[in-house]
Every structure is written in C-alpha cells, then in structure tokens.
Amino acid sequence: MKRNRDTNRLQPDKKLNHSIPKIRAWSFDYLLKPSTLGVLVLFGLLLVVLFLTPVIGMGDDGSTAAIISGSNLYNLGELTPKEAIAFFQKDWGIMEYYNDSGNAQITSQTPFLDAAKRLDQAFTWDWLFDLRFYGAVISVFYLIAMYFLFETVTYGKRAIWTYVIVGLGVLIFGDTGYTAWINSFYPQALSFFLVIILGTSLILMGQKKLNDYLLIGCFFLSALLLCLLNQQYALLGLFLGILGVNLRYVDEKKCYQRICAVCGILLMLSSLAAYFMMPHGLTKLSAYHSMTRGVLMTANNPEQALKAFSINPQYAVLTGTSYYQAISPETMNSPELATAFFSKVNPTGVAIYYLANPGQLYEMLNRSVDSSFNIRPAWLGNYEITQGYPAGAQTNFFTLWSYLKANYLPGNFGFIIIWMAVLIGVYVRFFRNGIIEKNERNTLRFVGLMTWLFIGLWELYVAIITSGDTDTLGHLFIFSLTFDLISFIILGKFIHWIAKQLRKVNWEARKEAFLNRNKDKEKKKNREQRGYRL
C-alpha cells in the first residue's frame, strides 16, 4: 500500500517534467513569430536610442509649457530659450508645493506624465524628473501598437515574406525621426501610438485575430485619448464616435452592441465637451501665419483677399513674412493691430475662404505635403548640451526612411491623389463584397484604412487654416504618420500577392524545361559544327 501511495505521489511530478519541454518549445516558438521578433528588434532600438548615452530626444520650443506645468513640473532654467530649442533637455524639476501657475493645462498626456513621475520618484527620490521615465511609459504602448500593426500584415503566417514585411515596418516606424519624439513633452509622443492602435484595432477585428471586446476597448480608449490630447483633435471624436456606434453591426451579441452604442455616444459627447472646454481659437502667432504664410501668400491679389476678411488692404505689405520678422513686438502687441487685424482672423473664416478659392487651397496642400515629409523639424536638436555636439545637431542613427522620404518622395498633393486612388482601388472590393454578402466584418479592413486617411487629411487641412505653411510640428506629423501606415499596409499586401503568385509556379517543371532547352541548344550546336567539318 505504501508503495502504491509513493507511486501515485510521483505521478504529478512526472507530468510536470513532460510539460516543461512543451512550455520551453512554445516560448521559443512564440519569440520567433514575425510580430514578436519585430517588437523585440524595436525594443532593442529604443533602448539604444532613447535610454543609453548619447540619449536622443527633441529640443523644447516652449509650446508644451502648459502641459509641463499641468503635471507640476518646471524648467530648471539650465538652458536659454535658444539653447532649449537646439538641445534636448533630459532633467526637469518637480514642484514640492502648490502649483500657482496660471497657464497649467490638463490633457490626456497628464496621466502618462503623472505615471512617469511616480515611477521616477520610486527609483530616485531626488526631486528631479528624468524625461526618460516618460519615454519608458510611452515606449510600452508604442510596442503594443507595433505588435498590432505587424499582426495586421502577417496574416498569422511565418513564411519568409512575413519577416520581410516586418523588417520593412521596423525600418519605417523604428526610424529615429519618429522614435525621438517619444523622449519629449510634445503631443506627438502620444499621437504616434494612438493613431496606430485606432486603425489596427479595426483591421484586426475584421481579421478575427484577437478578442473583439479587447479590440473595441482599444479603439474607443485610443479615440478618447486622441480627442483629449489637443483642442484641434477634439472634433475627430464626432467622426470616430459615429464610426464606433456603427461597429455594433459587426457582431450580433447584445452585450457587444450595447458597448458600441454607449461608448460611441460618450465619445461624441466627450469630443464636444473637449472642444468647448479646452483653450481654442488662434494664438497671435498662428493667426498671423494663417494669413501671411497662407491666404495672402497664395492670393493673386492680396489686397482683394484682405477685403474678404474686412481687413485694411494696406496690411498686404505683410505677405509672406513670419511673425518674428515682420514688425516690432511693440507694434504686434498694440491695441490697434489687435482690433484692425487679429480680431478679424478666425479658423472658420479662413476655412470658408479656402473653400471659395480651391486654387489657393490646392497650392497650400502642395506646400504642406512637402513639409510633412520632413518628420523631424530642422531647428530642433536631438542631443543634450553636455554631450558636446553642435547646437541643433540631429542624429543620423537609423534614419534611412526619414532621409529617403524627405529627399526622394514627390512632395505634392498630386502624388497624394494618385496614392489615394491606388489605396481605394486595391481595397474597395473588400468593402463591396462585405456589403453584398452582408458580412460587416469583411468591410473593416477598408474602414480601418479610410479612418487613417480621414484623420490624415483632416489634420492636413486643419494645419493649413490654423498656421499656413509653418506648422510642421503639429498636424502634419499625423498626416505623415498616416501616409506611412497606409503605404505599409499596401506594401504588405503587394508582397503577400507576389509570394502567392510565386507559390503557384511549378519550379521543378520550369527547371526541367530550362535544362531541356539547353540540351536542345547543345545538340543543335553540335550538328552545326559537324556539318561545318563536312
């Protein structure tokens, strides 16, 4: 009896020993999956670029002061304003007492900054905020977003072509021109991964790759965070909310349909609330550039264009000038200019003007597309001042894609129109088939790409009406990102199609035919030589 008990007692251990090789094999197999391998490579790149010396980040132009203050952080004042633009500043102060700053602003960035601040204090307790902790928090979500993106193009397969596509994705979205934004307070750090998750969650839902509730949660959460990121992103929530409500047709489960309807309505309400509650309207700098570097610069008759805004035609002398070079700061801040010029410039008026003058709008679209292909503004430096690099120096490490994009892609809106036609031509049949078959899930691949396209074009248009051709920091970043995302998906589809065609080829038969052809040629040559000898 004792012997039997001992034998039974050993059996669980025996089963565990058998399962250990299986667990190890599964882990090793999962690490070799194209999507996982791509994320691991990106993790290594981020580690080298963002966290190890020399640390790469983005210089501060002062536009994020309200966000920094809203998280109870402050500038240590170690750099002059000019140096702050030319060099990356890693260390920031943490306020110990009540924040009496009047310009503090709370956005969807604030929870991420607060989490990074707590993480920093847990490790250091030096009352200095190391921006790399914020970069680490953002990097986690960025890697999740990239895993989603890689899953959309690999179709769950492990063929050689899937690794090629993932490699291209690493080259494009691991480019330091993109990842350097992660080490900064700019909203690009968040919009980078939020926009990726928005589209990929829809595409993955159509492919039935991950849990529907997980994906619908990712869609609504990323949409909400994007809308609360900035006042000029807020109205996107109306479009994304309507889209979210219509996602209820994808699944017949009542619980799923209620989630879509409730979350979609809440997103629209949050979008409207954010639009009216966040600071809005044009700053003097933006209002000035929207006219001098936009409306007046592209008008055949600047005086006539000013009349459309009820502005004195004499201000046509400012055409093409920037805010800092036009007139003295005293004149720019004078009550006379505020009444005669700035009070009559608003986004709605500029938008209506461009719609009434499509030729000028097209010219501005050309200029903006060209600017957007420069992922990194030339005036923002990447290195800390202590690292000994010249002012405004930018890294060349892993920047092949950003270099090719800025220097060799056609930077005009005509190219974008052709590119959109290719996109719609390739993917509209999936949407059409889904509608005909009454299978809404099959339409989501097209819907996801169109969501990216709408967001990109919206931000391109908003950039024009708010800042003319000068806003390469804000809205044009999102347009550039959505262009790369859609191009990557199309390229992945093309490589998949080529691989599929190659698999259909009977290579053995072709080899035999080639060898037989060579033999026939040799025989013919020998016959000709024998005839020549005779």
Image (cartoon, rainbow, N blue to C red):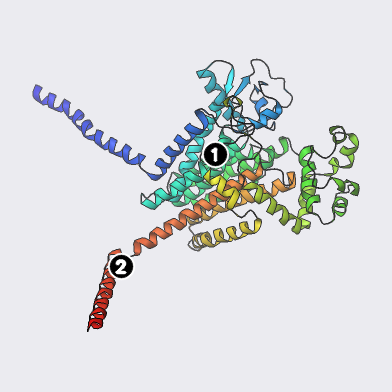
Report if residue 105 is visible in the image: no
Which element carries disc 2, helix, strand or loop?
helix
Residue kind at label 2, given as amino acid type:
Arg
Is label 2 or label 1 in front? 1
Q: Is residue 72 above or below residue 446?
A: above
- Quadrant in which the C terminus is drawn: bottom left
Q: Nearer the viewer, residue 369 or 283?
A: 369
Residue matched to label 2:
510
Do tag 2 and tag 1 residues touch (Cβ < 8 Å)? no
Q: Earlier in the sequence, mark 2 or mark 1?
A: 1
Which element carries disc 1, helix, strand or loop?
loop
In the image, taking residue 227 as reference, residue 304 lies left or right, namely right
For image coordinates 85% across by 55% down, the residue present is 301
For image coordinates 13% across by 24% down, the residue present is 6
**Residue 44 x, y percent position in the rendering:** 44, 35
Q: Is residue 181 above or below residue 511?
A: above
Q: Looking at the rendering, which quadrant does residue 333 occupy?
A: top right
Residue matched to label 1:
396
**Residue 346 x, y percent position in the rendering:** 79, 44
**Alpha-carbon distance for marks 2 and 1?**
46 Å
**Residue 382 x, y percent position in the rendering:** 59, 33
For image coordinates 80% across by 39% down, the residue present is 325
Q: Nearer the viewer, residue 499 or 22?
A: 499
Residue kind at label 1, given as amino acid type:
Asn
Count of numbered marks: 2
